[in-house]
Amino acid sequence: MDTWNQLYDPLGSILLSALVAALPVATMLIALAFLHIAAHIAAIAALVVALVVAIIVFGMPTAIAAKAAGLGIASGLFPIGWIVLNIIFLYRLTVANGSFARLQDTIAAVTPDRRLQLLLIAFAFGAFFEGAAGFGTPVAVTGAVLIGLGFSPLAASGLSLIANTAPVAYGALGTPVIALAGVTGLDLMDLSAMIGRQLPFFSLLVPFWLIWAFAGFRGMLQIWPAILVTGVSFAVPQFIVSNYMGPYLVDVIAALVSLACLTLFLRVWQPREIWTSTKLGGRAAAVEELTARGTGRSPAGGAGGAAAVTFQGNTLLAWMPWLILTVFVFLWGLGGVKAMLNGVYNLSVPIEGLHRAVIKVPPVVAAPTPEAAVFAFNILSMTGTGILLAAVLGGFAMGFGPLALLREYGRTLWVVRYSLLTIAAMLGLGYLTRYSGLDATMGLAFAATGVFYPFFGTLLGWLGVALTGSDTASNVLFGGLQKITAQQIGLSPVLMAAANSSGGVMGKMIDAQSIVVASTATNWFGHEGEILRYVFFHSIALACLVGLLVTLQAYVSPFTAMVIGG
C-alpha cells in the first residue's frame, strides 16, 4: 500500500506555511461573517480551498485527499447530523401537539424572569445534556426550548452557544478527557484533576458572562445572588468529582446539583425587577431586527404543517417528551449500553487507500505514526438513535399515529436539509485538514512561541475545536503536540495537555458545526454569519482568560501549586 508522510513546512517558513494552511478556515469565516454567503455554500467553498491547498501546496495525493474529505462528509451526517435531525423532529412534535406551550408555562411558573430562565435552561439544563451526550445535543435542545419560550432567534442561538462552554471538556461522559489520555499516554485521573482545577473558575464566571451578554451589566447585577448560586453549585461539584472520582459523571452530577440548587433558591428569592424582554440589546438587536425584516417572515417559525394533536393535560405530560429524551440520552451515553448495542450491530469500514496511508511524523508525534481511517457506522449506539426512539415514544404518548409521525419526519428532513449539507461539508473540511496536516502546521506555529507557550498553547486548543467542532477531536489532534512541546520547554505535560481541552471549550461556540446546529434549532436558517459575529468576541475573550490562567499556573507560585495538587 502506498503511504504519504505529512509535510508541515512546505514553504520553508513555518509562519508562512501556517498562513497558507489557514486559508480554508479564513475562507469560511469571511464568507459567513462578512460576505453573508449561505452557510452550506461557505462550507463547500472552504472545502474546495482546502483540497487545493492540501494537494498543490502540501503535496497530498489527490486520491488520499478526496477519501479524507469523503470520510469527513460521512462522519458529519453520522453521528452529528443524525442528532440534529432527530432532536428537531422531537421539538416540532411538541410544538404541533401544543405541549411545548404548556412546558413554557411551567418554566415561567418557576420564574417569569428571562435572565433566570436562561440560567435554568441554557446553562444548567444544557450542561446535563452536554454531560450525557455532547456532540451538539445541548445546543440543539436548549436552542429549541429558548426559541419556544419566546427568546429572539439570535438570543436563543448565541446564548445557547455561550452557555455550552465550561461543561464541554467533560462532555459525553468524559469522552474528551478519555481521548486525551489515550493519545498522550498521560494518566487519566491526572488529566481529569488538572482540567478540574482550571474549568471551575469559568463555571463560576460563565453564568455571569451569559447574563451580562443578554441583559447588560446592570441587568446582571440585579440577579447576582441567583447567578452566584448557579455558578458555585456547578463549580464545586465539578472540582470534587473531576479530582476524586474521574471524568465520567462530572457534568451530569454538577448539572443536577446546579439545577436543584437554583430551583430551590428561586422558591425563596426573586428579583425586585422582573426582566421580560427576550431580545438582545444594542447593535445585536438592530442586526436581528433588520435580518428578520429582510426575510419577510418570523424567525422563530413553528412546526408548520404538522399533524395537529391538541394538548390537553397537566404539567407532567408537558414535560414527558423531554423526560423521555433525558432518560434515553443518558442510557445511550453509558458504556455498557453502547457495548450491548454495538454487539448487535456495529459496521466498521476501513477506508481503503486512506486507512494507515497517511503518516504523522515528528515533531507533531514522537515517532512516525500511521493515521487510522475507519468509518464506524454504529447506528444503534449513536446518540441520535436514542433521540429518535425518544421522539417516537414521546410522539405516540402525545397522540400521534404512525402515519402522522412519518409525515412530520419527512417535513423535518426537508427543513434541515441545508443544515445537514453544511455539517457534512464542515466535517469534510475538518477531516481533510487533519489528514493533510494543515492543522498540525498551524499548531507548530503556535508551539514556536517559547515562553509564551502556556498562553498560545491554550489558544491552540481553542483553534482545534473551532476547526473540528469537537473538544474530543481537538484533543486527539493536538494532545500529542502539547505533550511533546511542554517537555521540550520544561513545562508540565499534564498542564499543557489539560490546557488544550480547557482552552478548547471556548472554541465550541464558534465552530461552524455548532453554529449550524444553533441556527437549525431556532429555525433561523441563513443567518449563521450573524450568529458567528455575535459570539466571536465572547469566544476569543474567554479563551484568552483561560490562557492567562494556564500561564499563571505555569509560572506563578500560588497558581503553580494547582499543577502539583497543592
Image (cartoon, helix red, strand yellow):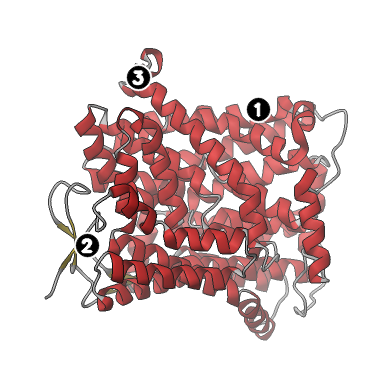
Mark 3 or 1: in front is 3
Check the image and report above or below for 370 versus 410.
Answer: above
In this rendering, position of residue 323 left or right of residue 94 = left
Q: Residue 287, percent across and down? A: 77, 55
Residue in view at x 50 percent, y 38 percent: 543
Q: Which residue is mark 2?
A: 371
Q: Nearer the viewer, residue 396 or 290?
A: 290
Q: Residues within 10 Å of mark 1 (few under 14, many from 20)?
A: some
Task: Write down the quadrant of residue 526 in the picture.
Answer: bottom right
* Above/below status of 283 relative to 554: below
Whether the residues at callouts 2 and 1 have beta carbons within 8 Å, the answer is no
| Nearer to us in this view, 35 or 232 | 35
Q: Is residue 503 shown left or right of residue 113? A: left
Q: Secondary structure at mark 2?
A: loop
Closer to the chain start, of discs 3 and 2, is 2
Which residue is painted at 85% across and 45% down in the image?
A: 277
Q: Amino acid at mark 1?
A: Val
Q: CA distance from mark 3 to mark 2?
A: 35 Å
Q: Is residue 439 left or right of residue 525?
A: left
Residue type, mark 2 in image? Glu
Is 126 on the left-hand or right-hand side of 472?
right
- Give the residue type at disc 3: Tyr
**Looking at the picture, does residue 323 appear above or below residue 456?**
below
| Label drawn at residue 424 | none
What residue do we see at 76% from left, 58% from top?
A: 148
Q: Nearer the viewer, mark 3 or mark 2?
A: 3
Residue under numbered circle 3: 555
Q: Which mark is residue 229?
A: 1
